[in-house]
Image: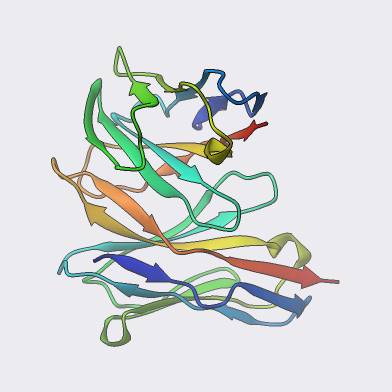
Amino acid sequence: AQKVTQAQTEISVVEKEDVTLDCVYETRDTTYYLFWYKQPPSGELVFLIRRNSFDEQNEISGRYSWNFQKSTSSFNFTITASQVVDSAVYFCALSEEGSGGYNKLIFGAGTRLAVHP
Amino acid sequence: DTGVSQDPRHKITKRGQNVTFRCDPISEHNRLYWYRQTLGQGPEFLTYFQNEAQLEKSRLLSDRFSAERPKGSFSTLEIQRTEQGDSAMYLCASSLDIGQETQYFGPGTRLLVL
């Protein structure tokens, strides 16, 4: 069965610290996509990144970086020099292909990140 | 604003009442999804529309739930005879009709059933 595990329920850091959010997934599919979303207190899920299962290159976008390792079924997310505005719940998600080629997302339980000044 | 919009943002109702939520997807997106998120959990898939056709429904969607997308544009999610267990955030997302495209989410409707 498809499953996403985010073992860290809550993380608390002081501003400017680096922080890594872990994500481990299970899937039978050979082709799949992984996503990270951010959910600030307002509630809206904000898309951060999508990664194809065939592309294991790490990606960096400003202070954000992602490490995808197929061998360990992990897709970890690192925030460098964290800021108070990074405080949110972060979700890792795995796409599961439904009938007709669309994808429904299987989400982890989320990691709540609190960045303190 | 060309993102996904949802209305209302908050709804408080009494047990047994019917409620209806609306979702307006990004205009060029043919795919529309509904998810439910309870406190402390990640969103869970409820149902999916390809244009006006509802192609999949989760077993989470009991007989009291019905969703429509009559003209392939906006969608409505109705809950009849609400129960306290229906209290949750209801999220709508849309995506392009190309493979496993990124889903963009609306702000959600937070439902509280008293």
Q: Quadrant of the N terminus of chain B?
A: top right
Residue B2 seen: no
Q: Residue at x 29, y 18 (%)?
A: B72
Q: Quadrant of the C terminus of chain B?
A: top right
Q: Residue at x 27, y 30 (%)?
A: B49
Q: Residue furthest top?
A: B71
Q: Residue at x 33, y 78 (%)?
A: A57
Task: Tell me which colouring the rendered structure shows.
Answer: rainbow
On the image, the x and y values in percent for residue A34 come to: 34, 64
Viewer-closest of A14 and A110 = A110
Q: Residue furthest bottom?
A: A71
Q: Is residue B84 left or right of residue A28?
A: right
Q: Is residue A102 left or right of residue A115?
A: left
Q: In the rendered image, which quarter is residue B8 located in?
A: top right
Viewer-closest of B34 and A21 = B34
On the image, the x and y values in percent for residue A29 come to: 16, 66
Q: Is residue A104 left or right of residue B104?
A: left
Residue B71 seen: yes
On the image, the x and y values in percent for residue A33 come to: 29, 61
